[in-house]
Image (spheres, rainbow, N blue to C red):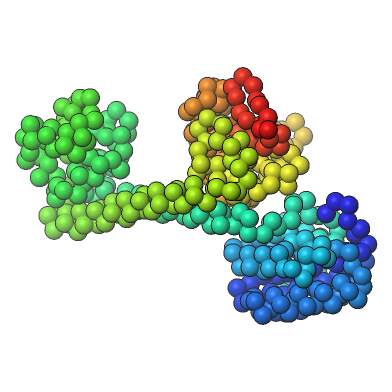
């Protein structure tokens, strides 16, 4: 909104829902010029456009600022329509999706307001009128296709996580020790390896495992691990010890548990295959979209096409943010101070009020960067040792702020990453 004459600007607030868009328009002096309820479809969008054109011509507005809450996906169509319509383009229409929490907090500054769609639309329009919008306007569908893919990828990852969590109870019932053993006492790196899956699904009960001779069990483990264990005999001893120490069940329970566990593994394998398909689609969609920005991000060790696309699909143009701190706040990777007098709390919680998709990709990218870049590994270890609880999560979140500063600086200057220097993309 730089260089706009606010006195000749029309401010429009839209309260979006799945079926209707409730709209309120006002001028800079807070005079309400129209209130309109239209269906959330093409016909409704055309009706809103006609109303905007009527007011623009009648009052000679030089620009129009449209604000709406960024809730779910119901505002995508109207945002695309208003920002790209050929009739509206000459009139400088700027569409701003806003964080609902900002609107909610702003509404508290009014006394005695109720809760209706019209009131919400009025508050959104007034939020825009007083100059509280700090983000760049909606860029249209430029990043939308990529964003749908990267967000769907996160959805699939969350499905796998949810299935793993659900499966724990069934594994504990069938093979109690295997579900609770940790680190060197566990025969496998996790219960989600191919060998663990074979043990839990191909052997009906613990008796089947106990009845195998040492040679048969070693052959079974080597076959399913494809001979990846350095000491398969030790693995088998840990496995047999876990079987001996586990609870025994009635025989009628083993088959239902085995079927349930096998179903969970099948679901996770299917999700993982779908993630591979989505990854290929992401790389295909990347071509032609801001190649310099993707080149910059992929120059950072540990960031590949998937992480780069996930970050840029949510950021869009880096110049929408005035600083690295603003980007961190947008992602929800920041901490509110807890201080009173001489007291300063050591344990503060991450706010997580921002864009959860950007937060996920930034933190996952950080976890990858620390494995490839010694400076990040050292910083992560320092924060890990300083943390009193939740060492890995806290250290990773704090290291993510270092990643955000790096990403913001490189994108802002259009520079490639180097451990010793950075070079500008020509």
- Across and down, in percent, residue 48 comes to 75, 76
- Across and down, in percent, residue 342 comes to 75, 31
- Across and down, in percent, residue 385 comes to 53, 24
Residue 288 seen in render: yes
Residue drawn 81% across and 73% down? 52
Quarter that holds the N terminus: bottom right
Q: How many marks?
A: 0
Residue drawn 73% across and 59% down? 96
Residue furthest toward the front? 426
Residue drawn 31% across and 38% down? 190
Residue toward you, 285 or 68? 285
Left or right, residue 231 beside residue 311? left
In this view, 306 is above or below 71: above
Residue drawn 74% across and 68% down? 86
Quarter that holds the C terminus: top right
In this view, 376 is above or below 212: above
Left or right, residue 184 beside residue 114? left
Residue 352 seen in render: no
Quadrant position of residue 104: bottom right
Residue furthest toward the top? 420
Residue toward you, 344 or 108? 108
- Across and down, in percent, residue 174 comes to 21, 49
């Amino acid at each position: 909104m730089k260089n706009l004459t606010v006195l000749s600007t029309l401010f429009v607030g839209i309260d979006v829902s799945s079926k209707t868009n409730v709209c309120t328009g006002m001028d800079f002096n807070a005079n309400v010029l129209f209130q309109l309820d239209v269906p959330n479809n093409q016909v409704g969008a055309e009706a809103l456009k006609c109303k905007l054109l009527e007011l623009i011509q009648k009052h000679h507005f030089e620009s129009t600022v449209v604000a709406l809450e960024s809730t779910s996906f119901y505002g995508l169509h109207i945002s695309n329509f208003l920002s790209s319509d050929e009739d509206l383009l000459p009139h400088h229409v700027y569409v701003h999706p806003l964080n609902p929490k900002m609107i909610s907090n702003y509404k508290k500054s009014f006394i005695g307001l109720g809760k209706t769609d019209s009131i919400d639309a009025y508050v959104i329009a007034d939020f825009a009128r007083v100059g509280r919008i700090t983000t760049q306007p909606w860029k249209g569908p430029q990043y939308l296709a990529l964003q749908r893919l990267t967000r769907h990828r996160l959805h699939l990852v969350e499905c796998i996580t949810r299935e793993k969590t659900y499966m724990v109870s069934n594994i504990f019932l069938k093979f109690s020790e295997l579900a609770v053993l940790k680190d060197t006492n566990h025969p496998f790196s996790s219960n989600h390896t191919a060998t663990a899956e074979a043990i839990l699904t191909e052997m009906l009960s613990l008796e089947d495992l106990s009845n195998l001779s040492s040679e048969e069990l070693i052959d079974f483990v080597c076959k399913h691990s494809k001979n990846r264990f350095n000491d398969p005999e030790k693995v088998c001893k840990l496995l047999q010890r876990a079987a001996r120490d586990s609870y025994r069940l009635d025989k009628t329970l083993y088959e239902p548990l085995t079927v349930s566990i096998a179903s969970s593994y099948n679901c996770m394998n299917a999700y993982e295959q779908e993630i591979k398909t989505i990854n290929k689609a992401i790389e295909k969609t990347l071509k032609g979209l801001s190649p310099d920005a993707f080149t910059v991000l992929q120059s950072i060790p540990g960031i590949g096409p998937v992480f780069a696309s996930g970050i840029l699909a949510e950021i869009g143009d880096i110049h929408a943010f005035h600083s690295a701190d603003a980007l961190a706040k947008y992602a929800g990777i920041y901490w509110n101070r807890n201080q009173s007098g001489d007291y300063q709390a050591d344990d503060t919680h991450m706010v997580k009020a921002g864009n959860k998709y950007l937060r996920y990709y930034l933190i996952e990218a950080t976890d990858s960067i620390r494995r490839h870049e010694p400076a990040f590994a050292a910083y992560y270890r320092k924060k890990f040792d300083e943390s009193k609880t939740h060492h890995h999560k806290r250290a990773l979140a704090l290291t993510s702020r270092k990643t955000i500063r790096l990403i913001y600086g490189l994108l802002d200057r259009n520079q490639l990453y180097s451990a010793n220097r950075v070079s500008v993309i020509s």
